[in-house]
Amino acid sequence: MNAFAYPRRSAERHYRTVFISDTHLGTRGCRSEFLADFLRRVSCERLYLVGDIVDGWRLRRSWYWHEMHGEVLRLFLAHARAGTEITYIPGNHDEVFRSWLPLLGTVGVTMSGIRLRREAVHVTADDRRLLVIHGDEFDSVLRYAKFLSVLGDWAYDAAVFLNRWFNVARRRLGLPYWSLSGFLKRRVKEAVKAIDRFALALAGEARRRGFDGVVCGHIHHAEMRQVDGVLYLNGGDWVESCTALVEHADGRLELVDWAALNALSVQAPRLAGALQPA
């Protein structure tokens, strides 16, 4: 079957809108097999790619590109060809694409059916206005001490490496995928404080600009909550948690944990069959 034929409205799950962030294609930590499975089994009218889709930082240091990473890109294009409106908002790891935008303002540029924009405004089916932005601009470490963010990136890579082998052991015991790094992040006091500061900053920006809520990524922590009267929505990532934010036809918003929903385990042999085109 043609590679651009399989996303359809008759997919297992159809949503009005899907928000995906922090896939980090080009890194060994990317759970591209889970993401490809999600993209094959879901259809939507609008798809927002909320930054750090391709990890330019890592690719500049050393080249790594699994064939499944290319499959994820083909699936994005397949959804575009099937009629999905796709908006790509670059993050800090794919900031090279931001250099294409200075003269375009909020209009953006469209390539292969995918619109590249600095940020976006999404209006839900129940008329809530959401600011869609990656969020690294509100990360004080990145803004004021970029070298510290690089050190943090190395530490994070080590945690992701441990997470991968931890889940290999879980699979051999017949247990489903579970994010060790995500669990540690939730238990470390300073990490919890940083997550709260980030949410406050994003919600404050949305409120200042008159939005009902904000959709972001960047910190790899899926969350949906009210922050000082503003809806804070973080779609999470496809390195630790394999989560996406979705909007239903009536405007209801939901965080989808794809690994938990499907009891998937990293490198599980049965997943290979599920990833074949229908």
Image (spheres, rainbow, N blue to C red):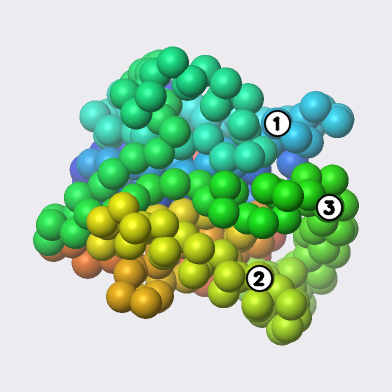
Quarter of the rendering containing residue 256: bottom left
Quarter of the image with the N terminus in it: top left
Q: Secondary structure at mark 3?
A: helix
User: Which residue is at the front of the view, 202 or 234?
Assistant: 202
Visible residue check, residue 187 = yes
Question: Label 2 neighbourhood size at 10 Å, few (<14), some (14-19), many (20+)?
Answer: some
Identify the amino acid type marked 2.
Answer: Ala
Residue in front for this viewpoint, 64 or 278: 64
In terms of sequence position, does the residue under pointer 2 or pointer 1 come before the other? 1
Q: Which residue is mark 1?
A: 56
Whether the residues at callouts 3 and 2 have beta carbons within 8 Å, the answer is no
Residue, disc 2:
194
Seen in the image, is 102 located left or right of residue 14? right
Q: Secondary structure at mark 2?
A: helix
Where does label 3 land, which residue? 148
- The correct choice, above or below, for 104 with respect to 24 in the image is above
Q: Position of residue 144 (x, y in %)?
A: 73, 50
Q: Nearer the viewer, mark 2 or mark 1?
A: 2
- Residue drawn at x 83%, y 52% is 148
Q: In which quadrant of the rendered view does residue 206 lie?
A: bottom left
Instruction: For marks 2 and 1, give the CA distance.
Output: 24 Å
- The kind of residue on which mark 3 rests is Leu
In this picture, is 80 found above or below 52?
above
Q: Give the camera-side residue of 28 and 88.
A: 88
State which tag comes first along the sequence, 1 or 3: 1
